[in-house]
Amino acid sequence: MEKHKKISVIDPITPAWNHMVRILFKPFEFKKWLTLGFCAFLSQCSEDGGSGFNNFSTTGNTYPGMYGWIENNFSTFITIACLALFAILALIFFVVWISSRGKFMLIDGIVKNRGAISEPWNEYKREGNSLCLFSFGVMLLYIIVFVVLGAISFAIAIPDVQSQEFTGFGIAAIVVGSIFLLLYILASVFVAFFIKTFVIPAMYIKRVSAVEAWKIAWVELHQPNRWSSVLLLLMVLLLLVGAGSIAMFATCATCCIGALPYVSSVLLLPIAVFFTCYSLCYIQQFGAEWTFFRNMCRFCSYDMQGLEEGHSCPECGKS
């Protein structure tokens, strides 16, 4: 790979769009659309956050005997709480596992232009399981870091808590906590972006574990073009604004039916396919070893099957 090679975040947009059109509309195959929609649904199931619990509220008078029962049966309460926590973690792990396997199914369907479930599910079993363990570990790390940062902020405010006054300690705790929270959010966004944009495609094409893919992506894709990676993140966020507007319109136009699980993945499949193609087309700029779409022009996605290697593209004229 060439060092300091100029990498663009604009150039991949056109081929990504052309790939999306080619995969979904040339020709339009309803069965393939539904299958790819199912793969997209699996890949996104660990990314969609529910808000059902946000509207749930209780007061101390809701269950008059609850606190008394806890005091009289504290050991039983601890056992039930531990079992509930274990069940929640097991459910989360299962969802992350399904989503991890689905991510490779979606990439495989896009790269090979097919709607398949069982083949990519089995073929990328090792990579999917590795991504699951890696993602679950990152999630636990998020929780630990959040608790530690919260504990530090609370420790600063302890003098005010003890004196029940609001002085400089409370102000310092708020300032430090706000800075920690901002840095935490920025780091979380970048890590999630890096895994989805670089690590997973590297795992797919290199057939390596998540840890190995992280190292490869960091050294070969990020470090030589750090600012390009930052611009890519900003471009993805900008494109997501437009995609969000389209998703909102589609939801309203279908009387919220389009917001249902799986239905939304099928209805908004062009968005999912475009963003995946955009990431893959961006990475393809790093050299032939990062080519995902074989026999396709890297600049406009024209099908160059049958042409000699090095031949100029008949569509865009680039070599």
Image: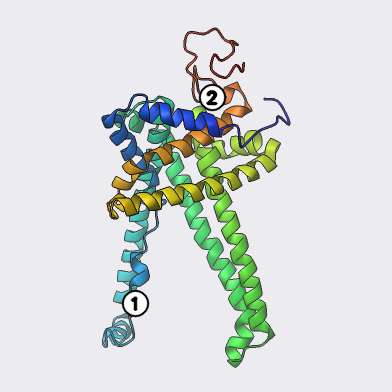
Answer above or below: position of 182 versus 23: below
Q: Is residue 97 left or right of residue 241?
A: left
- The earlier-in-sequence mark between 1 and 2 is 1
Q: In the image, which is nearer the foreground, mark 1 or mark 2?
A: 2
Residue under pointer 2:
300
x, y percentage for residue 75?
32, 77
Residue lying at 61% horizontally and 36% vertically, measured from the top left = 10
Q: Residue 123: image x %, image y %? A: 37, 28
Residue 310 vs residue 290, the one in the foreground = 310
Please, what is the three-letter code of the amino acid marked with disc 1? Ser
Residue 308 seen in the current view: yes
Q: Residue at x 72, y 29 (%)?
A: 3
Mark 2 crowdedness (10 Å alpha carbons): few <14, some 14-19, many ≥20: many
Front residue (pair 181, 35): 35
The residue depicted at 52 percent of the width and 62 percent of the height is 144
Quadrant of the rendering where the C terminus is positioned:
top right
Mark 2 belongs to which amino acid?
Answer: Cys
- Point out the residue furthest to the right here: 4
Say the numbered circle drawn on residue 57: 1
Residue 245 on image: x %, y %: 44, 51
Q: CA distance from mark 1 to mark 2?
A: 53 Å
Instruction: Give how far across and how far down residue 235 sits, in percent.
Output: 58, 44
Residue at the location (28% across, 55% down)?
255
Task: Using the image, determine if residue 156 lies above or below residue 99.
Answer: below
Q: Mark 1 falls on what kind of element?
A: loop
Indicate the quadrant containing the N terminus: top left, top right, bottom left or bottom right. top right
Horizontal side, residue 265 vs residue 317: left or right: left
